[in-house]
Amino acid sequence: MTAPPIRLATVDDAERIAGLHADSWRRHYRGAYADSYLDGDVEADRRAVWRSRLTAPDGTRTLLAEHGERLVGFLHVVFDHDTRWGSLVDNLHVVPDRHRTGVGTRLLTRAAEAVTDRAVGAGMYLWVLRQNTGAQAFYAARGAICVETATVEPPGGDASRLDGTPRKLRMVWADSTVRCPSSERR
């Protein structure tokens, strides 16, 4: 399978990004986010978030991986988000049939390059749900280390959107260097 090209997102991509984002949350966030929220119109919620982000992208970069006209993955990074930890990878989602094909690694590597080029600090980090052990293994294989746990903030600040008090892990790359495992196809 050939590696999909990666490009910068525009506001015209908000609809497709929101669709993939909502689908990914529905697949991976059950047990942390309330079923009523995930089964409701989470896509409309994500569409509003992405229109806002892509209308005013200052201090951020949103990268898309596409196969033809199909969006197969995206990543959103906020430069210099935290004075201690650096730039925040706020979203990284890949369609299920493109997992383990290198799409996520390529997006993460491109984000690290953008951090090196545009951010003041060299560090990069993200938050991952404690229950999402597959994603944790993916990040660890690319050089991230877990430095702390915290309580998940509810989407949109609405506590009814959570299922209990889920936890998240902060995964950190001190110098925004992303390793590519030798066994992974590029």
Image (tube, rainbow, N blue to C red):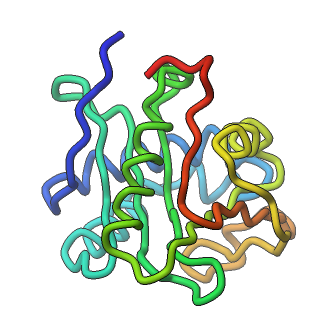
Residue 40 horizontal side relative to residue 181, left or right: left
Residue 125, quarter of picture: bottom right
Q: Is residue 56 above or below residue 24?
A: below
Q: Is residue 150 above or below residue 65?
A: below
Residue shown at 36% from the left, 53% from the top? 18
Q: Position of residue 30 (x, y in %)?
A: 73, 47
Which is nearer the eye, 55 or 169? 169
Quarter of the image with the C terminus is top left
Residue shown at 50% from the left, 82% from the top? 81
Quarter of the image with the N terminus is top left
Q: Residue furthest bottom?
A: 83
Q: Position of residue 114 (x, y in %)?
A: 34, 62
Q: Residue furthest top?
A: 1
Residue shown at 39% from the left, 38% from the top? 73
How many numbered circles does the render carry?
Answer: 0
Q: Position of residue 57 (x, y in %)?
A: 25, 75
Q: Position of residue 93 (x, y in %)?
A: 49, 44
Which is nearer the eye, 185 or 78? 185
Residue 117, quarter of picture: bottom left
Residue 14 horizontal side relative to residue 111, left or right: left
Residue shown at 49% from the left, 41% from the top? 23
